[in-house]
Amino acid sequence: MSAPVPLARRAAAEAVGTAALVAVVVGSGIQAAELTRDAGVQLLANSLATVLGLGMLIALLGPVSGAHFNPAVTLAAWFTGRRTADGPGPGPGLREVAAYIPAQIAGAIGGAVLADAMFARPLVQWSTHDRSAGHLWLGELVATAGLVWLIFGLARAGRAHLAPVAVASYIGAAYWFTSSTSFANPAVTIGRAFTDTFAGIAPTSVAPFLAAQLAGACVGLVLVAVTFGRPAPVPGDGAVAGRDEQHFPSPARPAEESTVSS
């Protein structure tokens, strides 16, 4: 068993991974908008690039940081793994949460700036794409709930190795079945406010999206509890809830033991 990955390296992986994810989302949106005026084709190109990019990033950085790239996932991992019967649980602690979330947000902003730079756009230009409507907030709640349900459900079911394909596929599907096109990520939402392009979101629309996403994460955890129950104790381990479950999203595990999440 190798030593745990240092927190600074894990936080750096979260920042770089989130930056790359937002660069894929924003950059493919710009490219699609320049190549065609058909909104359906634009969304298809944007969603396809996101699916491929996200799957690759999860597979690449999952062994380093857990590949959260998403404050909602980080907070859910902390909440579900915060304690066991014997004390602190195997999930990320508050120290990890405090390192991950700023790294994810900074990375998301940097990814948006990078995408704009690659297409000779103003490096920072607030989006004018208003997304303020109740049905869009509901779409974000549903998208985030499904994402959290999938990630932690895979862990409970012992299918965490399927995460790169399953999570990327879910996000690709949610682009199309949700009214909001499935941001499902507070950091990505903030980053996309910095680009006035196809994938942008007006700053005034950000706060309701974040609230819907956090509410969706709570709903997702409820769905995990309802459909999978509490994780069973591991024989000879002494821990009550958490080793099998947190084996998936926890970034604190050694590299060879870590699996991935989005």
Image (spheres, rainbow, N blue to C red):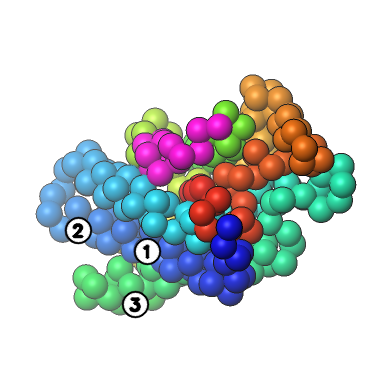
> Which residue: 58% across, 36% down?
155
Dot 1 crowding, Cα within 10 Å, few <14, some 14–19, many 20+: many
Tag 1 near tag 2, CB within 8 Å? no
Point out residue 45 in the picture as x, y percentages from the top left corner. 22, 46
Dot 2 crowding, Cα within 10 Å, few <14, some 14–19, many 20+: some
Disc number placed over residue 31 in the picture, else none: 2
Q: Which amino acid type corresponds to the residue marked 1 in the rendered image?
A: Ala
Asked whether residue 190 is drawn in magenta, I would say no
Q: Nearer the viewer, residue 184 or 132?
A: 184
**As drawn, 186 above or below 112:** above
Q: Which amino acid type corresponds to the residue marked 2 in the rendered image?
A: Gln
Point out residue 48 in the picture as x, y percentages from the top left corner. 26, 44
Disc number placed over residue 123 in the picture, else none: 3
Q: Which amino acid type corresponds to the residue marked 3 in the rendered image?
A: Leu
- Tell which residue pokes out farthest to the right in this image: 86
Asked whether residue 167 is drawn in magenta, I would say yes
Residue bearing mark 1: 20
Mark 1 → mark 3, Cα distance in angstroms? 16 Å
Point out residue 1 in the picture as x, y percentages from the top left corner. 58, 58
- Label 1 vs 2, first from the N-terminus: 1
Horizontal side, residue 67 vs residue 243: left or right: left
Q: Which residues are magenta?
A: 158-170
> Which residue: 58% across, 74% down?
8
